[in-house]
Structure formats: C-alpha cells, structure tokens
Image: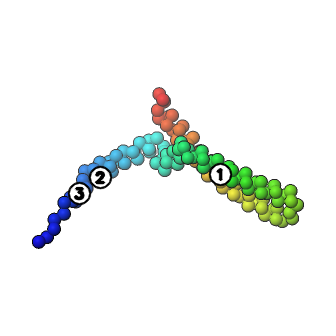
Amino acid sequence: MSKQSNSAAIIPEFDTFKKMREERAEMEVEEAKAGTTSSEKTIADLAAHSGWSLIENHVFTRIQTLQDGLQTAISNSSDFEAIGQRAVVVNLVQEELEGLINFVRSREKYINEKRAQNNPQN
C-alpha cells in the first residue's frame, strides 16, 4: 500500500514569467528614454534610505578619528617619516571614503534631475 501526499506541487505559471519579462523590457525602454539605468536608480535610492545618514555619519566619524590620530602623532613629536607615512595613509583613506559618499550623492542628484525633467508638473 502506498502513501499519498496531501501536498500539491507548485507549478509555475509561464504567463507570469512572460509578463515579468515584458514589464522588465518596458522598464528598460523607459530608462533608456530617461537616460538612466536601474543601477543608477538603485544607487541613488540609497541616499533616500533612512540608514544612509547613519552610514554617512559613521564614515565622517571614522575620517575624524583618522585625522585625530594624525594630530596626536604630530603633537607627540613623532619622527617626520612616521608622520609622513601616517599622513599619506590618512589622506588616501579619507579620499576613498569621501569618494563613496560623493558617488552616491552624485547619482542621487543626477537621478533627481532626470526625474524632474521627465515629470515637469511635479
């Protein structure tokens, strides 16, 4: 005697997948008309997320910590070579961290400008 299962198999509806592909294709056409890409929008949307301000604050706090460490090395009369090396590292890290922040902010500005151009009544 065999046992029968009461669970039904999940059968995908291929019309649903076809509809999703068509919707995605329509979105890509709209993006091309607007001159933006979904990756740009995704990055720009980061800036609108509530967690973004927390990330920005953390990055700027870390930059300040690095700069404070450099000032401490200078005030402790560390040798010039050590101060120079530390200054180079601090500047490189600061540039990279600020570059990430600026990248997201510039995408946000660009996307907002494109949205305003495409929706002048708003």
Q: Secondary structure at mark 2?
A: helix
First reached walking from the N terminus: tag 3 or tag 1? 3
Residue type beneath disc 1 = Val
Can you tell which quarter of the image residue 87 is in?
Answer: bottom right
Q: Residue at coordinates 60% horizontally, 47% vertically from top-left? A: 54
Left or right of 94, for residue 48:
left
Residue carrying label 1: 59
Residue carrying label 2: 17
Q: Secondary structure at mark 1?
A: helix
Residue carrying label 3: 11
Residue type beneath disc 3 = Ile
Q: Residue at coordinates 19% horizontally, 63% vertically from top-left? A: 5
Dot 2: few (<14), some (14–19), or many (≥20) neighbours within 10 Å?
few
Residue type beneath disc 2 = Phe
- Cα separation, mark 3 vs mark 1, equals 47 Å
Q: Farthest residue to the right: give it.
A: 77
Confirm or deny contact between disc 2 and disc 3 (CB under 8 A): no
Q: Secondary structure at mark 3?
A: loop
Confirm or deny contact between disc 3 and disc 1 (CB under 8 A): no
Which of the image's four quarters has the N terminus?
bottom left
Q: Position of residue 28 (x, y in %)?
A: 40, 47
Q: Residue at coordinates 49% horizontally, 50% vertically from top-left? A: 39
